[in-house]
């Protein structure tokens, strides 16, 4: 494992972190920064936000997000799966759009109510 310099994104402070070969983190002002630094070096993850097509709704796209972080290496695979989806209204906030997105154990959920347009 090589040393890395990162900017923490856990809170608005944006601490400049340094992670050494032994996973010692410096530059953080809180414990969350240390945890973020270690995770970012060993197994980086991201929350996905996107949109999917929807039929019979006021808008043509429904906003969605993953309800947890997935490994960064699976982002493109996840987006390919999301691009295949087409929903039918009505959809409620929190409805699961894709269960276990790319085998990550994380679900893709709707983030907006999309009622049927009459």
Image: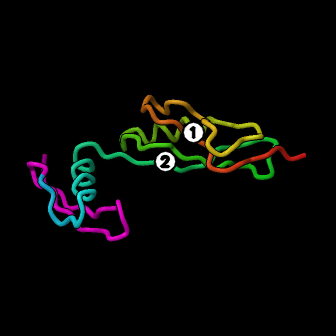
Residue 110: quarter of image: top right
Query: Mark 2 to mark 1: distance in Å?
Result: 10 Å
Q: Is residue 91 above or below residue 105?
A: below
| Rendered residue at 21%/64% (across/down) | 28
| Residue at x 79%, y 46% (from the top left corner) | 115
Instruction: Please tell me whether residue 64 belongs to the stretch shown in magenta.
Output: no
**Horizontal placement of 84 versus 100: left or right?**
right
Mark 2 touching mark 1, by CB under 8 A? yes
Q: Of circles 2 and 1, which is in front?
A: 2
Residue depicted at 77% across the width and 40% down the height: 89
Q: Judge whether residue 3 is colored magenta.
A: yes
Q: Residues within 10 Å of mark 2 (few under 14, many from 20)?
A: some
Q: Could you tell me residue 10's position as x and y percent?
A: 35, 60
Q: Which colouring convention does the figure follow?
A: rainbow
Element type where label 2 sits in the image: loop
Q: Give the residues drawn in magenta, as a range.
A: 1-23
- Residue 48, label in figure: 2
Taking the spot 82% from the left edge, 42% from the top edge, the residue there is 56
Q: Which part of the image, by quadrant, shows the N terminus?
A: top left
Looking at the image, residue 118 sits to the left or right of residue 61; the answer is right
Residue, disc 1 = 82
Which is the main secondary structure of the residues drawn in magenta?
A: loop
Q: Is residue 46 left or right of residue 14?
A: right
Q: Position of residue 74 (x, y in %)?
A: 40, 38
Task: Say which mark, if any, is on residue 41.
Answer: none
Q: Secondary structure at mark 1?
A: helix
Up/down of 6 relative to 55, above or below: below
Q: Nearer the viewer, residue 81 or 21?
A: 21
Q: Earlier in the sequence, mark 2 or mark 1?
A: 2
């Amino acid at each position: 494992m090589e040393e890395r310099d990162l900017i923490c994104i856990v809170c608005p402070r944006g601490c400049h972190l340094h992670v050494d070969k032994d996973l010692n983190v410096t530059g953080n002002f809180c414990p969350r920064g240390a945890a973020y630094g270690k995770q970012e070096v060993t197994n980086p993850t991201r929350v996905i936000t996107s949109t999917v097509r929807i039929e019979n709704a006021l808008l043509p796209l429904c906003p969605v997000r993953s309800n947890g972080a997935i490994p960064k290496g699976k982002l493109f695979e996840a987006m390919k799966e999301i691009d295949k989806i087409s929903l039918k209204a009505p959809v409620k906030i929190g409805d699961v759009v894709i269960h276990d997105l790319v085998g990550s154990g994380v679900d893709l959920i709707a983030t907006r109510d999309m009622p049927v347009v009459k």
